[in-house]
Amino acid sequence: MTQPTPAPASGPSRRAVVTALGALPLAGAIGPALAASPARAAESALPAPVAHWAFDEGAGATAVDSSGHGRELTLADGAKWGAAKSGAAALDVSAGGNASASGPVVDTSKSFSVAAWVRLTGTAGYQTFVSVDGLAVSGFFLQLRDDTGAFAFTRLPSDSTSANGGVGVAGAASAPVTGVWYHLLGVDDTAAGVIRLYVNGVLEGEVPYTAGWRATGATAVGRGLFGGARVDQARALIDDVQVFDTALTATDAAALAGVPVDSTQPLLTIDTTHPGPQVSTELGGIFFEDINHSGEGGLYAELVNNRSFMAAATPLHWSATGAATLAIDTAQPLNSALTQSLRVTAKAAGDGVANEGYWGIPVRPSTTYRASFHAKSAGSTGKLTVAIVGTDGKVHAAGTTGPLTGSWRTYELTLRTAAGAPTTANARLVVTTSAPGTLWLSQVSLFPPTYKGLNVVTTHDPRARRIYLAVVNTGGTARKTTITLQGVARTDASADVTVLAGAHPQATNTLTDPLAVVPRRRTVNKVAPTFTATFAPYSVTVLEVHTV
């Protein structure tokens, strides 16, 4: 089927730990005043849902609406009961089917939120978990998208298949896997003019959307509507679906997912005990040099050096492991843009290839990394193991793919380090095969946790004992952030903050409004080595902190 195709305008949105030199938060000029302690945010009571299906019946063809509004769902087309996330049962549509109620349970022209627990049994194709029918298309799709392979909360600007060009897709950046329960929450916030997607309580995507329209058809769990036809069959277990007639908050998202709200907030840890290169006092202004990886390998979080194998005619920054041999191959391109791939000839199981990263692959304890790559083999059906391995040979995290095929295929893995893993940059990314043979690799990527919308640069002036933190918030929502200055015992109780913010990303000064975007400078109080700060939407903030 045809579905809206624009890629989500959202980066990976995980809880981020940023280690850098320099430091601190912002405050009053951009949001609530700074808090001088990392106190856990209080969890307010959730709003009452307008519909709530726990799917605990376990028998029969009806799912009761426990909200008290009488919107029972009827199971149809092969939908059945299955193993629950919580309670006695869940809706099982892994072999087909859906559950629906006549009419909409919420007005989709106003603010609303929809939540569900989902456990995939397959990841192919578009899959819609909750929707409300219009005449031609669903008023919203809480879904797994086929074009990105990731969860998304999607809305078209009107009840028409021709409205694809203005589609809003708040999407996640990493692909889910089968057999794991995920909590999804889609929010349409008409006051902010955005739609959001939370996965397991964490804000994964946010995009502008102001074209809300009212869908008047059936409410469905397990399918969508497109071109007037029922589509997007979910292949999943679905549990505890709730719909709200308001835009839920980040605190609400954490409460629904059953995780501490503090664990869903971005965390910036500034390590002042390991300063970087000294900047000459004769240099002024802004200097950006990509020769030393200010962009790729710097601000851009990619950890693999020469991931596309396009840097040279030899496999620059890659080395063989075991008895493997490597060569750049122009006869096996991934596509017309990536015309070189890496040919790996493995003589035995365990042979493979390693990437040195940008001065090593950084390792931190209890950290989740996203690995992805394209691969194919010449007749071999062996699997690949992807691992972050220390220079001492210790494996810090690893994952294994399914069997390779003779055609290019995308593989995605989640690698997580143990709580006892070291904090070090003395590691590399290693890909090994389970069987001898020839295989090809292209676009090998490894990302650490990143946080959508916040870009951070830090520096300091040791003589003046000042730490500078520059934060860019590219998103349309204020970002509440806990910032810790490792190695700093005391700071002055106040700090200078300068904020440059606009009402929207296109905001600019004009002859009629020359002061639309101008720096605002002020002093903030309650500064300490650990802060909670809120960064304004569409803003650049520079904070100057004096250490004692």
Image (tube, helix red, strand yellow):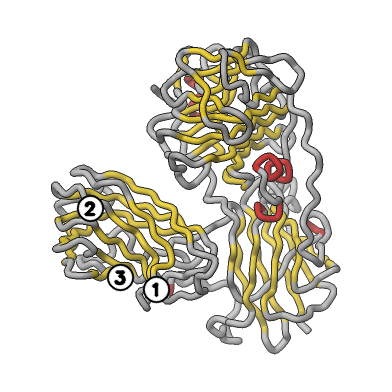
Residue picked out by circle 2: 339
Tag in front: 3 or 2: 3
Q: CA distance from mark 3 to mark 2?
A: 18 Å
| Most foreground residue, 459 or 184 | 184
User: Which amino acid type corresponds to the residue marked 3 in the rendered image?
Assistant: His
Q: CA distance from mark 1 to mark 2?
A: 31 Å
Q: Which quadrant holds residue 529?
A: bottom right
Disc nearer the start of the sequence (1/3)? 3
Residue 61 shows up from this direction: yes
Residue 333, percent from left and from top = 21, 50
Q: Is residue 333 above or below residue 359?
A: above
Q: Which mark, residue 410?
A: none
Residue 340 shows up from this direction: no
User: Which amino acid type corresponds to the residue marked 1 in the rendered image?
Assistant: Gly
- Indicate the secondary structure of the residue bearing disc 3: loop
Residue picked out by circle 3: 317
Disc nearer the start of the sequence (3/2)? 3
Residue picked out by circle 1: 390
Q: Residue at x 58, y 36 (%)?
A: 85
| Most foreground residue, 113 or 44 | 44
| Most foreground residue, 286 or 17 | 17
Q: Are marks 1 and 2 in contact (CB under 8 Å)?
A: no
Q: Which quadrant holds residue 102?
A: top right
From the viewer's perspective, is 8 left or right of 315? right
